[in-house]
Amino acid sequence: MQRILVVNPKGGSGKTTVATNLAGYFASQGDHPLLTDNDPQGSSMRWLRKRAPQQALVHGIAAYERDSRVTRAWQMRTPADARHVVVDTPAAIQARELPEMTKSADAIVVPVLPSDIDIHAFSKCIADLLLIAKISRNENRIGVVANRVKRNTLAYQSLLRFLATLRIPVIATLHDSQNYLRAAECGLGVHEMKRNEVARDLDDWAPLLKWLRDKECAIGADAEPAGFMPATA
Ligand SMILES: Nc1ncnc2c1ncn2[C@@H]1O[C@H](COP(=O)(O)OP(=O)(O)O)[C@@H](O)[C@H]1O
Ligand SMILES: [Mg+2]
């Protein structure tokens, strides 16, 4: 069982895009992943509702809703057939919420856009993860995704310069691509679309998926068995 938290308090940085595409990827690989949506806007749950019945199963939990008929732990339980849990988070998350939210995450994926405002918000997010959630760089749990990149732009160059100072791995660079909009409209991930139409996007995802796979192998034998387990903080 691998738990992946996608976080960045800046809206529009690509959290839902990364979370839903990860869920789509795991589903395309034969897993029945759990996608947990902590954002009251419910974008990940909307994506899930758009999936056609013939699509591979992705479980969903609208964590922003409280179901008064069952205990919170029951509402948040991870289905036994899910080997991956992907947690989408809201914008404007408070730094004090990070310790609880990150404590059981095997991987913390932080998407960032190449823009001044986004880099500023992102640097505060990384500082909060290191200093408030007390995640050490040595744990190698945090990975940065440069998102909506247009190569050869000044904004991308300054993002790269900033990222080079961080000593946190950049695990993927995702191009600005209409395919993410097309995928979102049909409740798909790019890995579930026609390969020839998304070839460059799939290349973009390869290092991110490898980073996650390597971590999964590292957890290896002492991984918690799939089964009942609260799906979020
Ligand atoms: N790599 C990308 N290329 C093109 N559009 C993107 C990309 N990543 C995200 N988007 C679009 O940007 C908007 C915001 O992304 P979203 O994932 O909803 O951000 P967040 O969840 O952080 O608020 C959405 O319309 C999404 O389709
Ligand atoms: Mg979102």
Image (spheres, rainbow, N blue to C red):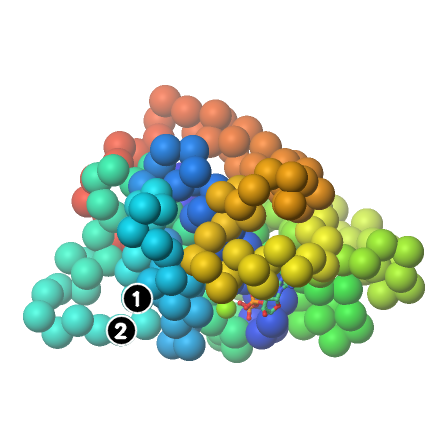
Residue 46: image location, x then y, percent = 39, 68
Q: CA separation, marks 1 and 2?
A: 6 Å
Looking at the figure, which quarter contains the C terminus? Answer: bottom left
Hey, which residue is sitting farthest left in the picture? 69
The quadrant where residue 10 appears: bottom right
Image position of 176 (left or right of 189): right
Tell whether label 2 touches label 1 (CB within 8 Å). yes
Nearest the eye: 172 or 134: 172
Residue 204: image location, x then y, percent = 68, 43
In the image, which disc is placed on residue 65? 2
Residue 80: image location, x then y, percent = 21, 39
Nearest the eye: 110 or 182: 182
The quadrant where residue 123 appears: bottom right
Q: Is residue 97 visible?
A: no
Residue under the point 43% across and 58% down: 187
Give above or below for 186 relative to 224. Answer: below
Q: Is residue 77 visible?
A: yes
Looking at the rendered structure, the number of numbered marks drawn on it comes to 2
Image position of 209 (left or right of 24): right
Mark 1, secondary structure of its residue = strand
Mark 2, secondary structure of its residue = loop
Residue denoted by label 1: 62
| Three-letter residue code for mark 1 | Ala
- Count neighbours of disc 2 (C-alpha within 10 A) and say few if under 14, some if 14 to 19, many if 20 or more: few
- Count neighbours of disc 1 (C-alpha within 10 A) and say few if under 14, some if 14 to 19, many if 20 or more: some
| Three-letter residue code for mark 2 | Glu
Figure quadrant, ligand 1: bottom right
Residue under the point 71% across and 43% down: 200
